[in-house]
Image (cartoon, grey):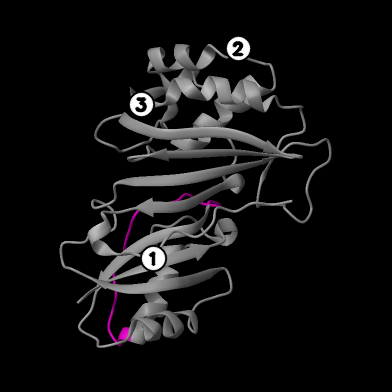
Amino acid sequence: MRIALGIEYDGTKFCGWQAQRGVRTVQQTVEDGLSRVADHAVQLTCAGRTDSGVHAVGQVVHFDSDAERTPRSWVLGCNANLPHDVSVLWSRPVSDDFHARFGALARSYRYVILNRATRPAVLDRRVCWHHQALDAERMQQAAQSLLGEHDFSTFRALACQAKHPVRTVEALRVSRAGDLVYLDITANAFLHHMVRNVAGVLLAIGSGERPVEWVDELLQARDRTVGGVTAVAAGLYLVSVRYPAQYELPPAAAAPRFS
């Protein structure tokens, strides 16, 4: 039987999603917990591999198991064997053609920026702190150039292993609520560091260091070396993954919002 799970985690103390020898990862941690419930080794496939320090409230994974467990048993049993910074939210049996990664239609991320003169304490490692004043309207204006299908070579990490740099951004919105600026982006798929590189470019534009037109120049350049800084991981959240309705997965959790 193939099982799909929804997972949330605080990425602060994890070295990313993907299992690696000798370091603490989300994948290995959840696989260890599930293996105890299944009474056999479990291997997970996720919708999107997050980097070290990146959080998730709507990660989706799948695994195969011959163990007969109810959805509630998978959730409660796994959570009983997980540390406090990762939790299984839901479990659903799915057909064998479901694939958490390749079956996803779109993924949504939120990048949270605390824009004030003093550094955070309560929100430390939960947000990106930017002490220079930001013009969210300028950031929103610049972000519109990224909508649609583009070659995002300038916005991918130099070590990105994707076969091609073309991605389609469905939605991209920058909004402000008091001292907090939210960057919400949805695309069919993302390149390595793509959201953090987009955030870095928009931060430079919002600070007045670069013009709004800089985004167009970067898209045309197709060169990561001219693309500015990569924003810190702490403010990034994988919010949701969209799949065909036929799989009847639970609705996504609300995007993180602070006050």
Residue type beneath disc 3? Gly
Q: Which residue is mark 2?
A: 211
- Considering every residue shown, the one lying at the far right of the view is 118
The quadrant of the picture occupied by the N terminus is: bottom left
> Which residue: 29% across, 75% down?
42
Q: CA distance from mark 1 to mark 3?
A: 27 Å
Query: Within the image, what quadrant is residue 72 found in?
Result: bottom left
Q: Are marks 1 and 3 in contact (CB under 8 Å)?
A: no
> Which residue: 34% across, 45% down?
106
Q: Is residue 26 visible?
A: yes
Mark 2 is surrounded, within 10 Å at the Cα level, by few (under 14), some (14 to 19) or many (20 or more) other residues, namely: some
Q: Which mark lies nearer to you, 2 or 1? A: 1
182 in the magenta segment: no
Q: Which comes sooner in the sequence, label 1 or label 3?
A: 3
Image: magenta residue range: 38-54
Query: Would you place residue 17 above or below residue 73 in this image?
Result: above
Secondary structure at numbered mark 1: loop
52 in the magenta segment: yes
Q: CA distance from mark 3 to mark 2?
A: 21 Å
Q: Which residue is mark 3?
A: 148
